[in-house]
Image (cartoon, rainbow, N blue to C red):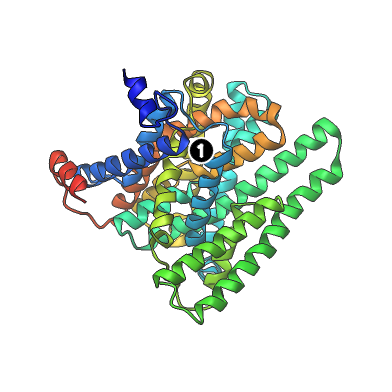
């Protein structure tokens, strides 16, 4: 009966089979509603809700790993926007005026690299696997820290240091990843030329493309108000164009927007004010970023890599905390601020997932050994990371608290828009 009615109404096929856009829209709606619920009802960052939807998708076997196609494009685009914003807040003159801050950034990145490698070797992983896991897990998530800071209206010494440290250890993580891939080429193929040329090309080429992007954005900014809606779309288009060029030329899709933001910030003394997420399209990309990253885990991956991931996260947190606290008095931070800053470095998210996807594309057999550990670590910090960043900013007294509403009232408010 129903099939006859469907045929009469020309509904084909019957029963309807939802396609990818339907599920993406459903995840967008669920993430948006849950994000508003946890923000308004519990006072937590919205990305906790976004990531929770992703975790549910992963548990149902609908995860986005291996990261490819539309999911990879969404992650690349959203990270490009967030890393561009992050880079545009890094003032290099501050690093020259406070060399302890630069030493802190380098020390915590290198300390986590060494500590995680040693801990995973102690756990029994092979040297190459341990080193690769450490390299990809070195950086804190720029996407998480920028979103949490923006939602909380955080401002102050710890917030600005968090931005600088995240930018520096993102740079270190990309470089370490390229060196590890180069070493794999030497170890397996004995190809020293490829091992050296690929990291050099990634750094030099990304730097040149970033300089071009920064120059074009600065030229546009002298003629248009970037806070205007049409100008913000132009800015979004320029970043997307640079990202597509980076992908086509096998450059780093992480370094290009990050370095462009840094170059743009330091070309002038005035701070840059960007439209939030570069408009509603950017906001949708950011929401989908955390849904996709949260869904990258699987039950099989966690069953294989959970214990190693716990060792990785423990060693990483201990190393970053020790390095930050060691340099805190010299850089002008009190103990409470140092502890808060170390908590903001806990998040591990989209940046690591992109580096893992690059490893998967280049050396898939080796990436299969690394993936369970890193996917488990990302899953564990999908909710813990944003909470740790919020606790760190609150401990440093840089969070601007909002009144917490009752959950049912928050859900009603979210449904009413």
**Quadrant of the rendering where the N terminus is positioned:** top left
Residue 154 position in % (x across, y down): 32, 59
Find residue 309 and report its horizontal and vertical position in percent.
51, 28
Q: Residue at x 55, y 39 (%)?
A: 353
Where's residue 132, x and y in %? 65, 35
Vertical placement of residue 76 versus 115, above or below: below
Q: Is residue 87 above or below residue 217?
A: above
* Residue 406 in which image quadrant: top left
Q: Is residue 357 left or right of residue 83?
A: right
- Would you say residue 407 is visible in this rendering? yes
Camera-nearest residue between 5 and 299: 5
Between 237 and 52, the one lying in front of the other is: 237
**SS class of the residue under badge 1?**
helix
Tag count: 1
Residue at 52%, 52% (x, y): give it.
77
- Direction from residue 94 to residue 118 in the image, left or right: right
Residue pointed to by mark 1: 316
Q: Is residue 233 above or below residue 252?
A: below
Residue 39: x and y, percent?
25, 46
Residue at (21, 51) in percent of width and height: 417
């Amino acid at each position: 009966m129903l099939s006859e009615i469907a045929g009469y109404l020309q509904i084909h096929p019957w029963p309807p089979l939802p396609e990818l856009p339907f599920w993406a829209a459903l995840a967008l709606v669920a993430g948006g509603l849950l994000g508003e619920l946890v923000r308004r009802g519990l006072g937590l960052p919205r990305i906790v809700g976004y990531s929770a939807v992703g975790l549910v998708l992963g548990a149902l076997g609908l995860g986005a790993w291996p990261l490819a196609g539309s999911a990879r494009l969404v992650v690349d685009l959203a990270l490009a926007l967030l890393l561009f914003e992050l880079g545009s807040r890094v003032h290099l003159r501050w690093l020259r005026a406070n060399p302890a801050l630069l030493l802190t950034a380098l020390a915590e990145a290198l300390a986590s690299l060494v500590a995680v490698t040693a801990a995973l070797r102690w756990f029994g992983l092979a040297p190459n696997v341990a080193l690769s896991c450490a390299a990809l897990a070195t950086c804190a998530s720029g996407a998480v820290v920028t979103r949490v800071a923006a939602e909380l209206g955080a401002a102050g010494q710890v917030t600005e240091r968090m931005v600088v440290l995240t930018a520096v250890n993102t740079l270190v993580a990309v470089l370490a990843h390229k060196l590890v891939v180069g070493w794999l080429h030497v170890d397996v193929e004995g190809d020293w030329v490829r091992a050296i040329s690929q990291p050099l090309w990634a750094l030099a080429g990304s730097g040149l493309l970033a300089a071009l992007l920064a120059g074009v954005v600065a030229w546009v900014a002298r003629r248009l108000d970037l806070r205007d809606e049409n100008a913000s779309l132009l800015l979004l288009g320029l970043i997307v164009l640079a990202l597509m060029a980076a992908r086509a030329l096998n450059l780093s899709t992480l370094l290009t927007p990050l370095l462009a933001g840094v170059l743009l910030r330091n070309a002038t003394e005035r701070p840059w004010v960007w439209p939030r997420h570069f408009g509603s399209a950017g906001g949708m990309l950011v929401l989908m970023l955390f849904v996709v990253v949260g869904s990258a885990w699987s039950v099989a991956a966690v069953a294989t890599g959970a214990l190693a991931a716990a060792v990785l996260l423990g060693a990483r947190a201990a190393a970053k905390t020790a390095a930050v606290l060691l340099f805190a008095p010299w850089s002008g931070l009190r103990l409470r601020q140092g502890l808060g800053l170390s908590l903001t470095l806990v998040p591990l998210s989209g940046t690591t997932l992109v580096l893992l996807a690059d490893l998967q594309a280049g050396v898939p057999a080796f990436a299969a050994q690394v993936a369970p550990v890193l996917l488990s670590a990302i899953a564990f910090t999908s909710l813990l990371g944003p909470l740790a960043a919020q606790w760190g900013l609150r401990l440093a007294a840089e969070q601007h608290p909002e009144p917490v509403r009752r959950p049912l009232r928050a859900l009603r408010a979210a449904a009413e828009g």
